[in-house]
Amino acid sequence: MHAAIRDLVRDGDTVALEGFTQLICFAAAHEIIRQRKRDLTLCRLTPDLAYDQMIAAGVCKKLVFSYAGNPGVGSLQAFRRAVEKNEPRALELEEYSHFGMVGRYIAGAARLPFYPVNSYVGSDLPRANPRIRQIQSPYGDEKIYVVPPLNPDVAILHAQRADKNGNTQIWGLTGVQKEAAFASQRVIVVVEELVDESVIRADPNRTLIPDLIVDAVVVEPFGAHPSYAQGYYDRDNAFYVEWDTIAREAATLDAWLDEWVYGVENRAAYAAKMRARLEKLKPGDAFAEPINYGEYKA
Amino acid sequence: MHAAIRDLVRDGDTVALEGFTQLICFAAAHEIIRQRKRDLTLCRLTPDLAYDQMIAAGVCKKLVFSYAGNPGVGSLQAFRRAVEKNEPRALELEEYSHFGMVGRYIAGAARLPFYPVNSYVGSDLPRANPRIRQIQSPYGDEKIYVVPPLNPDVAILHAQRADKNGNTQIWGLTGVQKEAAFASQRVIVVVEELVDESVIRADPNRTLIPDLIVDAVVVEPFGAHPSYAQGYYDRDNAFYVEWDTIAREAATLDAWLDEWVYGVENRAAYAAKMRARLEKLKPGDAFAEPINYGEYKA
Amino acid sequence: MNYSQNELMIAAAARELHGARVAFVGVGLPNIVCNLAQRSHAPNLELVYEAGVFGAKPARLPLSIGDPTIVTGAASVMGMPDLFQYYLQRGLIDVGFLGAAQIDKFGNINTTVIGDYKKPKVRLPGSGGAAEIAVLCGKILVITRLGKRAFPERVDFITSPGHLDGGDARKNLNVRGRGPEAVITDLCILRFAEDTREMTVTSLHPNVTRDAVQANIGWAVRFADQVETTAPPNAEELRLIREELDPQRLYSR
Amino acid sequence: MNYSQNELMIAAAARELHGARVAFVGVGLPNIVCNLAQRSHAPNLELVYEAGVFGAKPARLPLSIGDPTIVTGAASVMGMPDLFQYYLQRGLIDVGFLGAAQIDKFGNINTTVIGDYKKPKVRLPGSGGAAEIAVLCGKILVITRLGKRAFPERVDFITSPGHLDGGDARKNLNVRGRGPEAVITDLCILRFAEDTREMTVTSLHPNVTRDAVQANIGWAVRFADQVETTAPPNAEELRLIREELDPQRLYSR
């Protein structure tokens, strides 16, 4: 992880860590903080705790987003301080709805000049963000809003498993992981497990991200904690609730960063320090029935 | 199948039987011929043998398509007779490329007024089909071609398996099965196997078509022969080659329809008559490794 | 039987889903409401989550709208492009159930900022999927606690359009869905007048006075000609809330 | 060593994939060519099929571009929207390998009609994915047998644009890909002149005369200053074609 972030994330870059509720790569966010990256434009539908931490650490210059809350808990306190009080620094905002962000990633991945979404009618969002525009259909009177493509310099995507080349499989909520990967110039995949290429190729319909666009594969078990990885561990909901308290004051937040980010060398050290808590998050088993692709040789 | 085609396909309807190379629902095409449906507008990226047979049988008034060939063999002879000689009747054409048809189904499924595709530049296709139009991006000078939505009255989609409610799973080539289903007013799903709801729900990432949009579920083992069903049977390539000979003369083609379509009551009778041939098409096993979704109760 | 105002609100909101086939489940209170409906009077209600889930059968109350329990055992799980385009924009969702930081006289919802957008007094989380849920679902139900700041005459920012300026304003913009139908609060239920589209109290919860309601609304609120009394939660609803859905009492205390 | 003209054509075409990372495999001859390249000099060549496959490792020669053998053991299999948008339109494909019913002096390809579009003499299958492959791949390679009807000075219908009217015509239209680079036939190899973009014979197959080539081309074809002689297929290429890829000799007789 150290090398991947060092080599592929540069000061001033536009960076997307995606993963809707699950597979949020806290391991990468913490490494970005530890390496004191600066002036990043951070993109994400739901800037969650990982982004609150990066904002608090002064990594982030601008946020491109659609929902900046602590999901199921309330507000993101560091985000609020940055927007309401410019602490620790001013935060530029470029704001959409989820569908708008989804459309931006699709357009980015497909190299389209814009993407049409039937939303924003009657909303004040287009007034707040002039990049949300309206065009006319060439097949009738209908007008429709469009959003511009989003093409990050780097996408960092957590997944259940990949092979060493970077062919990556995700199940459960896949969010915009695929679109963010194809939209970006560089891609870092972080996985719970590295598996043999034969495991991936035995179920190619599950491969969302091909090795072709992957620049680095990093193995980080529990790399998405306190978010979750379907089938591997549950969300650490208690931490999401605790964060609301930790983040209310800059001082307690900074102390937390000192202990859990700056104070640990890497994710393995974090996981070791967190071990008792992590072990409680393992779910029961619920296996899919295997399917037959058939062998077609002759 | 008889009841599904009787109740859901009406004379004059726009009908899409999709499935790219695999899962082409010949069982439904034959039932449409047997029930002597008339004046259908038939949509499909690759009008294949099933469409050649429907064209020869006089079912089809208009074809919306992107590649009317016998894949890997050559031309579709009944299609050519219809276009070149108006036999057995004139055939209206609305022609796109694959990407254009893909875009039309996406727009239809997403209820978008148009869909942008970076294609057709320098091609004569937009001159042949004025529904392919160009619009201007609101974010710069770029122009891009767009296609209009395709919203068939009925989609007929073959699949490996579904539950009795219509939740449908497909693996291998999924083509535009999902988009065609969501684009259409009515949906008939035809499956190799009916499975318990628990089998579907044990692997929800594989469900492409939800029961919500399905009007009828029909079980027809070997219903896609002579095309194939990944993991169930191989393509009967010899038949694709034979068809080139059968279809060269209207008389031999009509004799074939008499024997294999009008002359059999239903797909079960066809499969029984074809049994020796079908048994040779079974592939070897190549199972995917099962994945764990995890049980999240507490 | 004893029950809290929140329990009553949740149970009353769940009953509003009577007859609905497919509900889009918003973050927070709507989550417990839709799960209660599925476990009580509406076992065939299909739950759709913007996270990419159709036909969820949560084994526990989802802790968020992206909880792993909405995936395991669901009918279909997909990427967000498919969910937003092929379900929501396709018009397959009968009812969108939303929360609201602020909601005004005409049902416009603000979850973006209190104060000026550029220099907000309070920065709220933003739209999420609400801006499109508000225009693309067949109708909208809202659940939120009553309060003067939460119910201003005009919201500071329209994140998710309701009936805009009232009357035919929404129809004139060619918005697809019919918009807000009811607002379920901890004190009363409000619906929108046929002609003016103004929010109107149609049902008071037991022992709640008109004055108590008016004291928590930022404009002179209208009351329907016939104001009903909201039915209290029944024993089974309370059991489901207390034992199955919210044993930690995060939503229902 | 004995070999057929078709075997030579296939082997020569496969060698054109030297250095390519990702090839978009067209229907017919391109299929055997790309599979031969993967099994001989280019084991890391990634095969992309419009059917929705990236990284195919076919265990047999695919009978069509949607054969089940391109699925089993592939790196990734997806719906066609993803393949066309996120791979092809995204610009991930180095080389598109196409066949052609007709190809003209500037590499424009016709697979639609012979004669008038509305009243064709011969109705051909149409574009398939060729119209977009022709504009979105980094470059295009074409394999087709030489013949006067197949090589007219101008095609009856441009299905897939080559260099259009030659010169800068393609660049002026802002087409993304660089267009046709080589045409491999059963008698010779042709490339496109740097300035005029006119198709030019650069290599003759062994024992093929200039006259034989000209007799099969519908315009006065140019020959490069230095015309090479195409290297014959080697023993391993012939073994792969005859034993593994085309034992029934459908393409290579």
Image (cartoon, coloured by chain):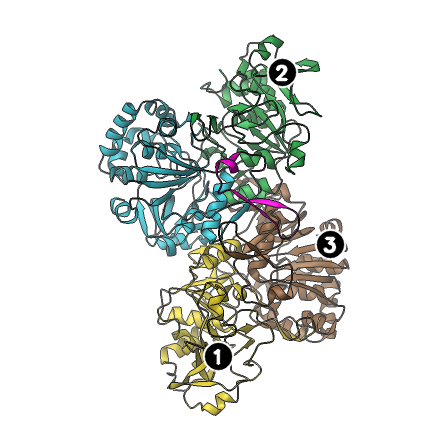
Chain colours: A cyan, B brown, C green, D yellow
Mark 3 or 2: in front is 2
Q: Where is residue A182 in the image (x, y as percent from the top left)?
A: 42, 51
Horizontal side of D86 relative to A221 (left or right) equals: right
**Circle 3 is placed at which residue position?**
B13
Mark 3 or 1: in front is 3
Q: What stretch is highlighted in magenta?
A: A121-145
Which label sits on residue C221? 2
Instruction: Give the image quarter of residue B174.
Output: bottom right
Residue type at mark 3 is Asp
Image point (73%, 62%), residue name: B60
> Which is nearer the eye, B202 or A12?
A12
Which label sits on residue D252? 1
**Numbered label tally:** 3
Image point (76%, 68%), residue name: B89
**Contact check, label 1 and label 2, Cβ < 8 Å:** no
Residue type at mark 1 is Ser
